[in-house]
């Protein structure tokens, strides 16, 4: 590539932006919606920043037409959103037509503007009624999830081509049950492993149900989050520390989905907890191994790892089975949420996935950054840091494609500033600014930048 040349993306590359139901919809009691574990969690003192919650969030439930218009104005061909299980099934089992009708209207509005909907069936908002029965700790959750997936497919399957089962089961299992930072707020590494297995079982059970119902052209997948482990020194001890983190963070969910079962090194690392293998029953791994049409890749930041002298010493990283290693503080430059910006890790991750997934295509289902916005007196929203983050990380994706990785699309996180889980409304990830007092939306500089990349299907050249 000569300097100044555009860096083009492949023809038909899928561009878009992503959101999740609990983070944007609000209206948590409208039209018969049941409570979710996040409604409960947010009400508990000390869990979420200043007890912020999903109401009214971006009030997207009433403002969805305006938001779809915005997606159209940005020229984004794809919009990834999640359906809220407690809206569709308030008690986790019985369909509430009014809840489904919302997604029906949303899909029609998107299609009316030529925007391709991508449905995520679960982005962490389990119906509280199911949590009361044991939630992800019960095997039965897999059948419940497959029923829910079928109900949504029944309503939208005639029009939606892109389906993903779970968003980041790592987070809902390990942050929800392992370190208690997410709902339902349990801190128990043994339970976290059981919850993790049941997430995968739910994915596989739903995949089977969806595959049976799907029409030609429909694509089914799962979205996983990855954080490459970086080590300062290239020696055996450092490599092993990185390997341990990589096993539990990056391969735990991926390998069973790819049909390889749980990684052997991971099984050894968690064996002393005696929780994962006892939860796996005959046939489970076959269920989990349903073929996926692509893997959704969420990337934000790498993790720095280092070995401890004693290989059995407790880790400062609260993930199940991690011993003999610590994570190190992230290094500058950081985003406002404290995550390290390191674009080469994104390229390395995609290259590794390209090899590891053996030909299964990849779609970047989330990538983005939290920064504080500057609102000018004329109302323009300046976010130069986010523009740079997107430029660098899109460059990293382009580089992976140049090296032969089959990346089919890129979705920015997020369309809108929204409810950032335990951080409440303190962290803004949007390419569109939301003034939460007035619900006014303003496209940020990063939104204009991204729209321009999408329109040209290319990044501006290296102006160096
Ligand atoms: C995504 O998850 C979510 O899908 C989305 O809803 C969210 O708004 C967005 O990112 C921004 O946060 O040190 O082991 O606790 C983020 C993925 C995974 C990033 C866990 C932070 C901390 C790992 N996150 N990670 S750990």
Image (cartoon, rainbow, N blue to C red):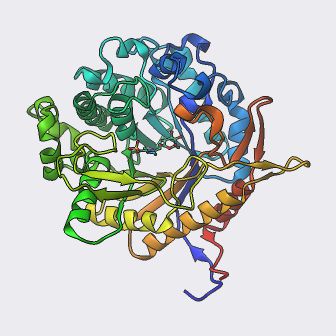
The reply, left or right, for residue 101 in relation to residue 184 is: right
**Compared with residue 309, is residue 142 higher up or lower down, i.e. above or below?**
above
Q: In which quadrant of the rendered view does residue 140 lie?
A: top left
- Residue drawn at x 12%, y 40% is 271
Q: Is residue 175 above or below residue 309?
A: above
User: Which part of the image, by quadrant, shows the C terminus?
Assistant: bottom right
Residue 30 shown left or right of residue 273 in the figure = right
Name the residue nearer the viewer: 419 or 200.
Answer: 419
Q: Looking at this rendering, what residue extends furthest in the front direction?
A: 309
Percent x, y of residue 284: 15, 35
Give the quadrant of residue 420.
top right
Residue 447 picture location, percent across and down: 70, 54
The reply, left or right, for residue 269 in relation to residue 347 is left
Residue 196 drawn at (x, y percent): 27, 34
Q: Residue at x 64, y 78 (%)?
A: 461
Q: Nearer the viewer, residue 453 or 207?
A: 453
Picture quadrant where residue 417 is located: top right
Figure check: 410 above or below 203? below
Residue 243 visible in image: yes
For the image shown, how many numbered marks are present on the structure?
Answer: 0
Please state which of residues 413 and 361 is positioned toward the viewer in this rendering.
Answer: 413
For this orientation, the residue located farthest to the left is 282
Which residue is drawn at the image coordinates 67% and 63% (left, top)? 455
**Identity of the residue drawn at 52% across and 63% down:** 12
Residue 221: % across, % down? 36, 45
Q: Is residue 10 visible?
A: no
Placement of the N terminus among the 4 image quadrants? bottom right
């Amino acid at each position: 590539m000569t300097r100044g040349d555009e860096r083009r993306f492949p023809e038909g590359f899928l561009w878009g932006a992503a959101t999740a139901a609990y983070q944007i919809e609000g209206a948590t009691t409208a039209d018969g919606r049941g409570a979710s574990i996040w409604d409960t969690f947010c009400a508990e003192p000390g869990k979420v920043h200043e007890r912020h919650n999903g109401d009214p969030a971006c009030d997207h439930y009433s403002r969805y037409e305006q938001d779809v218009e915005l997606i159209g104005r940005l020229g984004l061909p794809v919009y990834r959103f999640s359906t809220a299980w407690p809206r569709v099934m308030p008690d986790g089992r019985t369909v509430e037509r009014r809840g489904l009708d919302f997604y029906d209207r949303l899909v029609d509005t998107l299609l009316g503007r030529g925007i391709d909907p991508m449905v995520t069936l679960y982005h962490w908002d389990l119906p509280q009624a199911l949590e009361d029965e044991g939630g992800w700790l019960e095997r039965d959750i897999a059948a419940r999830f497959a029923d829910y997936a079928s109900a949504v497919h029944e309503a939208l399957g005639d029009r939606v081509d892109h389906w993903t089962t779970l968003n980041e089961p790592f987070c809902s299992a390990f942050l929800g049950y392992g370190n208690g930072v997410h709902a339902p707020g349990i801190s128990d590494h043994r339970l976290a492993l059981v919850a993790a297995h049941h997430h995968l079982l739910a994915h596989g059970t739903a995949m089977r149900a969806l595959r049976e119902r799907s029409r030609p052209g429909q694509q089914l997948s799962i979205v996983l989050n990855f954080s490459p482990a970086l080590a300062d020194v290239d020696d055996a001890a450092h490599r092993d520390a990185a390997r341990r983190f990589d096993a539990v963070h990056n391969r735990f969910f991926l390998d069973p989905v790819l049909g390889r079962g749980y990684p052997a090194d991971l099984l050894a690392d968690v064996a002393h907890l005696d929780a994962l293998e006892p939860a796996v029953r005959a046939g489970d791994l076959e269920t989990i191994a349903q073929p996926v049409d692509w893997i959704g890749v969420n990337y934000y930041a790498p993790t720095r790892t280092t070995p401890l002298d004693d290989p059995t010493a407790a880790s400062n990283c609260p993930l199940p089975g991690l011993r003999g290693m610590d994570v190190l503080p992230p290094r500058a430059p950081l985003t406002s949420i404290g995550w390290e910006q390191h674009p080469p890790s994104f390229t390395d991750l995609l290259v590794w996935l390209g090899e590891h997934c053996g030909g299964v295509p990849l779609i970047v289902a989330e990538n983005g950054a939290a920064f504080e916005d500057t609102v000018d007196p004329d109302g323009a929203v300046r976010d130069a840091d986010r523009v740079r983050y997107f430029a660098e990380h899109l460059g990293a994706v382009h580089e992976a494609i140049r090296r032969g990785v089959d990346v089919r699309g890129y979705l920015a996180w997020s369309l809108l500033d929204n409810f950032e889980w335990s951080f409440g409304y303190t962290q803004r990830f949007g390419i569109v600014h939301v003034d939460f007092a007035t619900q006014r939306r303003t496209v940020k500089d990063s939104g204009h930048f991204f729209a321009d990349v999408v329109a040209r299907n290319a990044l501006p050249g290296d102006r160096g």
